[in-house]
Amino acid sequence: MDYRKTFMPLNLPPSTIATSLASLSTLTSTLESLTNSRRLPTTPLSNNQITLLLNTLSLMDSNNNVNNVGVGEREGRLFSSLVSSNNLLSGSAHGVGRSGDINASQPKAGGMSVAAILARCLVLDAIRRGAGLSDVAKHGVVLPVCTGMGVLITLMSLRGRIMDHLDEEEECAKNVILWARCDQKSVLKAIKTAGFKVVVLETVGRCGGGGGGGGGGGGDTSDSDSSADAVHTNISLIEDLIKQHGADKILAIVTTTSCFAPRVPDDVPAVAKLCHKNSIFHVINSAYGIQCRHTIKNLLKRAVNVCEKNSEYAVSAVVSSLDKNFMVPVGGCLVYGPNKQIVDGIGKSYPGRGQGAHVVNLLVTLLAMGMEGYKNLLDNRERMLETFVGGLSAVATKHGERLLRTGGNSISYAISLRSLDKERAGLLGSMLFKRCVSGTRVVVCGNEVEDGKEGEIGKKEVCGIEFVEYGSSCSDGRGYGCSYLTAACAIGMREEEIGVFLERLDLCLAEAKKKSNSIIHPAAI
């Protein structure tokens, strides 16, 4: 549109028109630059610029065209004006993708298609240039599901990739998944729901065990042993399991770089070598790993580079949550990796269209951050770690507890709860929640010494598999060795929140100890 010709008949002063058009030109040129470069702007866009983009995209959808007559079974009709107005892309109702590919453009939703393309390009640019994932995130797809479902779709796509090379009468023999035990249900449920046989990669390590499965349940540990209380996957067992079940029967190994302390991220470079050697796919659950540069530098980047470039097995796909890493509402994940065919195949495996709220929320958030804002968030999280960890350790020491040594996990931290009996330890989480502290996690372990007797080790069945002390990720038959509380220093946390959390934790621990009648374990410190 030639705005000068449009406004000329109104006889506005030339100076007024010139000033007004300059303002419009600034807005439109920024948006043109965005679509041409498909890179996250260095500085944030203003709300006016973002709103202009959203309004423009909204008008590109067929259901917002005043001349459109829809005679199909799905025409984007919105009955409630509240629903329409509550949508950032006002009135957009057609979603993203087509039945054959979630990345495909939707003919009835040109605006939403543009939003989806921009969101995917900008989020990949953010994690490449901002987080340092350039080697890992060469290709990516944004799915309208959470991390667990993202893993499910990824595994089914990888199975389909094998089946594409089989004759019609042949069945895919690769029906086994080696899963590194991590006591969060989503991934395990995803594997089982996809119809695979799960073989659990058990963990080693317990409180005071030095990460090797030994130790007497929380004995003295030296300051130099930063992983004395860590629980991690027993990587040495993988080769034995591959021989036992056969590489020709194992579709993938699923590891994690995101976990609650005392569980620590897996040695994914070592697993990558084994996967490449045995032609087994490697899927990494990095639900909130994008925000952790330690994970990226020491695990993900090394895993990609341990083998020849473009190996489809060393790192087949990484699945990360959008809400955990980019501060958007729940409802989307990013699947990425170095192999284009694998990532494209995952996008084509998604059945049907997807709702578009996740891409609009992501697009708006990234534009409001800008690359500088995103990097600042990552820097601030790292800067606050010293305050967070130091404060947590100080509160623990004050109450006769200690910070558990779980080196390698630089997001989630834990403190022992030996001075509380099992009942009081179990109530500590709810006490904090009632005082408006969310996100902590209390795991009550069964072999605390009470009344001179060692308690029973709890067992729980999840997805048909029995686990010792589920919640602790600890496979040691003696249990983890002490109850504990976890808390995370995640992206977006403010320094003042840390102070308030520590104050309330101090008060709750004091209150819980007053009511606890347990015998304090002699190795509490």
Image (cartoon, grey):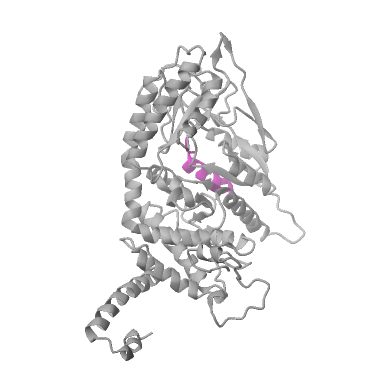
Viewer-nearest residue: 62 or 212: 62
Residue extending furthest bottom? 9
265 drawn magenta: yes
Task: Using the image, determine if residue 303 lies above or below residue 429.
Answer: below
Image coordinates for residue 93, horizontal then vertical, percent: 57, 67
Quadrant of image for the C terminus: top left
Q: Is residue 23 left or right of residue 511?
A: left
Question: For residue 179, what is the image quadrant?
Answer: top right
Q: Which residue is rendered at x = 37% and y = 31% of the image?
A: 502
Q: Is residue 63 left or right of residue 387?
A: right
Q: Is residue 141 left or right of residue 33?
A: right
Viewer-nearest residue: 343 or 153: 153
225 drawn magenta: no
Asked whether the viewer can see residue 212, the reply is: no
Image coordinates for residue 170, horizontal then vertical, percent: 75, 56
Image coordinates for residue 177, horizontal then vertical, percent: 63, 44
Tell me how many marks there are.
0
Task: Using the image, determine if residue 24 lies above or below residue 178.
Answer: below
Residue extending furthest right? 169
Q: Which residue is rendered at x = 66% and y = 61% of the image?
A: 164
Asked whether the viewer can see residue 362, the reply is: yes
Image coordinates for residue 209, horizontal then vertical, percent: 48, 22
Viewer-nearest residue: 341 or 466: 466
Quadrant of image for the N terminus: bottom left
Question: For residue 102, what is the image quadrant?
Answer: bottom right
Viewer-nearest residue: 425 or 435: 435
Q: Magenta stretch? A: 263-283
Residue extending furthest left? 15
Q: Which residue is rendered at x = 61% and y = 50% of the image?
A: 152
